Image (cartoon, rainbow, N blue to C red):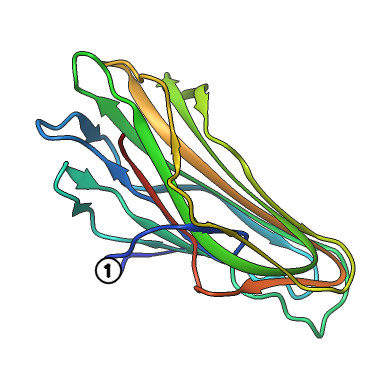
Amino acid sequence: MRLKNPFRNRWIRVVGATLGALFLVPIPGLALTFLSPWTVLSNVATGPGVPQAIVTALADGNNGKGPVGRILVDMGSVDTSKSGSGSSTVVLQRRFSVDQASGEHLQYLPSFSSELKNSSGTISAVIGRLQNNRFTPVFYYTTLYGNANGNTPVTFEYAGNGFISPIIGKGSQYALRITFSYSKRGNGYWKPKKISHHKFEFSRA
């Protein structure tokens, strides 16, 4: 597992790809409060030619509505000289609370671009309640899938307006958990397409 901490500013979009970032954004009056730094819960790569993801924590920013939590995940490029099945999965988490009395709608804005050949990718995000270190899902954002069968490379992208949660209530401790998972078959691979990373923004809608 590798965790670096250079501080840069980035933004978001979504595609099936190799690097990722995430943002958690509150409203004026600190409607959201970060309760922890980013945590890498798991970072596992298996199989020939499959690189381990590189996670880079970024300094929190501010988008005018409040602080923005940022993180980048680079899933790397598969070594195409090595054939065989393989996979790479990384799970990230950041704890937060909602301080607004009426609760908040939270918007998740992903952005990434990947080229896949004989491989697949999945990116999912879920808000959960944390009690006694137990994570109980509250809301699942739309899961993003990319799949390329055979030897014809395919580009998977998302560049929409993101996804909005129902009202997340005040008080409880919550966490946003994001999972990146890529797998290849035979001579398959994944690699960056238009950008070399995944990015995400999580904010008040």
> Where residue 181 appears, x then y in whole percent?
66, 52
Left/right of residue 149 with respect to residue 124 in the rendered view: right
Left/right of residue 165 with respect to residue 76 in the rendered view: left
Q: Can residue 4 be spotted in the picture?
A: yes
Q: Residue at x 79, y 63 (%)?
A: 119
Q: Residues within 10 Å of mark 1 (few under 14, many from 20)?
A: some
* Residue kind at label 1, given as amino acid type: Arg
**192 to 98, vertically: above or below:** below
Q: In terms of depth relative to the viewer, which is nearer, 136 or 164?
A: 164
> Where residue 5 appears, x then y in whole percent?
32, 65
**28 to 144, vertically: above or below:** above
Q: Residue at x 56, y 66 (%)?
A: 113
> Where residue 164 appears, x then y in whole percent?
42, 32
**56 to 204, vertically: above or below:** below
Q: In terms of depth relative to the viewer, which is nearer, 196 or 54?
A: 196
- Residue carrying label 1: 8
Left/right of residue 84 with respect to residue 43 in the rendered view: right
> Where residue 105 appears, x then y in whole percent?
33, 26
- Element type where label 1 sits in the image: loop
